[in-house]
Image (cartoon, grey):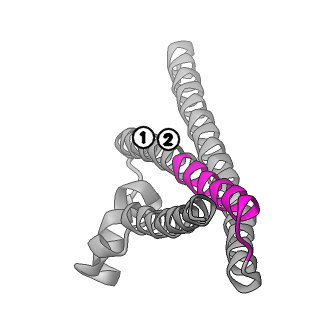
Amino acid sequence: MGKRDIYEIEARSDYIATLLTYYEAIMMAVDRWINVSWTFASIFIPASMVLAGIVVSAGIEGWVALILSGACFAITLCWFLLWYRTFMFNEIHLKQLAAIEEHLAEKLNMPEGLCPQLTMSKKLKARFGRRANLIKIRYIIPFICGVLCFMWALMLGLALLSLLAP
């Protein structure tokens, strides 16, 4: 093995190490965004449901009901926007991860089973069949947020009507 071969091997291993470092950085960023979104949801969405229960069961009317309904509507809407931003961020970066995996699989002759982003859709279709298209977070979260926003809009409307009606 000559000096040139050693330099080529070192350059190749540096290239692969750089790709793997980039891969890891993307995974950490994706994980961070998911944690932020779900932490926000796990705190504020149940809190807004508790507030809804308090407003309905205690029969709160007037300005307090208006303020609580408006605040909870804003919280739900903000969480949906945060979730959508997280979803789009992750969608783009998961495509980058798949491209890195595909490139590494070609360079290193890795089996496809070691590349989770490349085999994910096949595994989901094998496990859930056509239901994999229906059970997508892309559709479930906007539906939940839509129902919650509709509920808060109704409560907001009722609070406004109680203030305007003599």
For label 1, count other residues whose C-alpha is less than 10 Å away and answer few (under 14), some (14-19) or many (20+). few
> In this view, which residue lies farthest toward the left?
130
Between 42 and 12, which is closer to the camera in this rendering?
42
The x and y percentages for residue 158 are 55, 68
Residue for badge 2: 89
Horizontal relation, residue 162 to residue 145: left or right? right
Asked if the residues shown at circle 1 and circle 2 are in contact, with their CB atoms under 8 angstroms apart, the answer is yes
Horizontal relation, residue 63 to residue 4: left or right? right
Between 19 and 49, which is closer to the camera in this rendering?
49
Q: Is residue 61 magenta?
A: yes
Horizontal relation, residue 20 to residue 125: left or right? right
The x and y percentages for residue 139 are 36, 65
Between 150 and 26, which is closer to the camera in this rendering?
150
Amino acid type shown at disc 2: Phe
Magenta region, mostly helix, strand or loop?
A: helix
Residue for badge 1: 92
Amino acid type shown at disc 1: Ile
Hey, which quadrant is residue 108 in on the image?
top left
What's the CA distance linking mark 1 and mark 2? Answer: 6 Å
> Does residue 9 lie above or below 153 as drawn?
above
**Residue drawn at the location 67% of the way across and 59% of the way down:** 66
Total residue callouts: 2
**Residue drawn at the location 30% of the way across and 74% of the way down:** 134
| Element type where label 2 sits in the image | helix
Please give the range of residues in magenta.
60-81
**Residue drawn at the location 73% of the way across and 58% of the way down:** 63
